[in-house]
Amino acid sequence: MPPAPPLLEVQDLRMHFPVRGGIWRRARAWCRAVDGVSLTLQSGETLGLVGESGCGKSTLGKAIVRLHSPTAGRILFNGRDLAPLSQSALKPLRREVQMVFQDPGESLNARHSVGELLAEPFIIHRIGTAADRTARVAALLDRVGLPASAADRFPFEFSGGQRQRIGIARALALNPKLIICDEPVSALDVSIQGQILNLLLDLQRELGLAYLFIAHDLAVVKHVSDRVAVMYLGHIVELADADTLYRRAAHPYTRALISAIPVAEPGRRSKRIVLSGDVPSPIHPPVGCPFHARCPHATERCRAEKPALRQPDPSRPDHQVACHFDL
């Protein structure tokens, strides 16, 4: 039986922002936040997306849900390209693709009660009567572990973890197939992070959701992801299933990230790989491999030729790495 077509397929996506200057505010340069990213995501799967701050992870997520209009490339959702669609054409598709933001304090309107926030998607899409919406709001709150009485309160009356539960409930309102999780636990205490992660996993099993899980914490990503994509300076540099990536990382950048994961054994120290230099500017990216300026294995070929994603091990076709050499 042939494999099922992907729920989401991103093809050579680019998101370039103008850097304006002068009296006429003309574009003097371009910030290449996302510069040719391709990936796929199956129904019910979690794809982790990791990398340092500023590598383009969140920009990629926002482009997929069309909060940004891509500069180039395709975003195929169930075979339909979202990239060229107008806002009116996107409206019915927004039921199926939703987003959970990093900071629920900023993403929830403080002037609206929780009940109003959760009822808003139903009002926009003209779903149900007022009584139906009240019942739906209560059901959403129950699903994320909050009492029905929370509907009468305002976001500032809740803790950070509770606000994130409200954000998750809002994302679930229209029964989506795909949720973009943009660092959903990075602003929370460690003890609360586990609760939110377990909630997301329970919801995935119950509802068959697919997640694009964006984070910079590789330990968190390992806990929730089926596959992991590593992003650097707007590019995917390695992509593999979670077990392969953490055991047999092939890219020097991925190895450095994994070496920074704390070891949960007293007295045992991991061998930390410390990268030299700073991340280059996405306004003036380096020629050749985007990582060559910080790579301890870089050669003249790396400085001149950009590597394409390839399979380092023919026996593992799902493992891809953008590196000229087998390390």
Image (cartoon, rainbow, N blue to C red):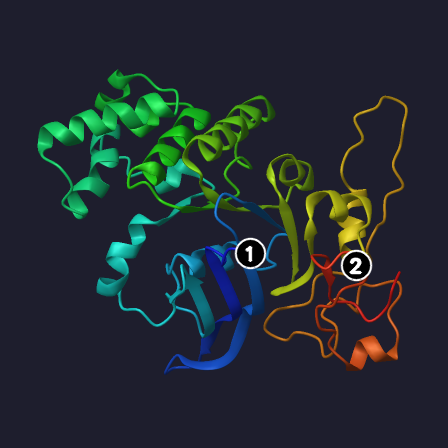
Q: Which residue lies furthest to the front in this view?
A: 1
Distance of label 2 from label 1 (alpha carbons):
28 Å
Percent across and percent down for residue 260 are 78, 42
Q: Nearer the viewer, mark 2 or mark 1?
A: 1
Task: Answer with mark 2 or mark 1, whichever residue precedes in sequence.
Answer: 1
Left or right: residue 182 compared with residue 89: right
What's under tag 1, amino acid-wise?
Answer: Pro
Please give the residue where the numbered disc 2 appears in the rendered image: 251
Residue at (29%, 37%) from the top-left corner?
Answer: 173
Residue 63 lies, with reference to residue 164, above or below; the image says below
Residue at (81%, 57%) from the top-left corner?
Answer: 250
Q: How crowded is mark 1: few (under 14 residues within 10 Å), some or many (20 or more)?
A: few
Mark 1 residue element: loop
Percent across and percent down for residue 24 are 36, 83
What's under tag 2, amino acid-wise?
Answer: His
Residue 187 lies, with reference to residue 142, above or below; the image says below
Quarter holding residue 279: bottom right
| Numbered label attached to residue 3 | 1
Residue 305 lies, with reference to residue 107, above or below; the image says below
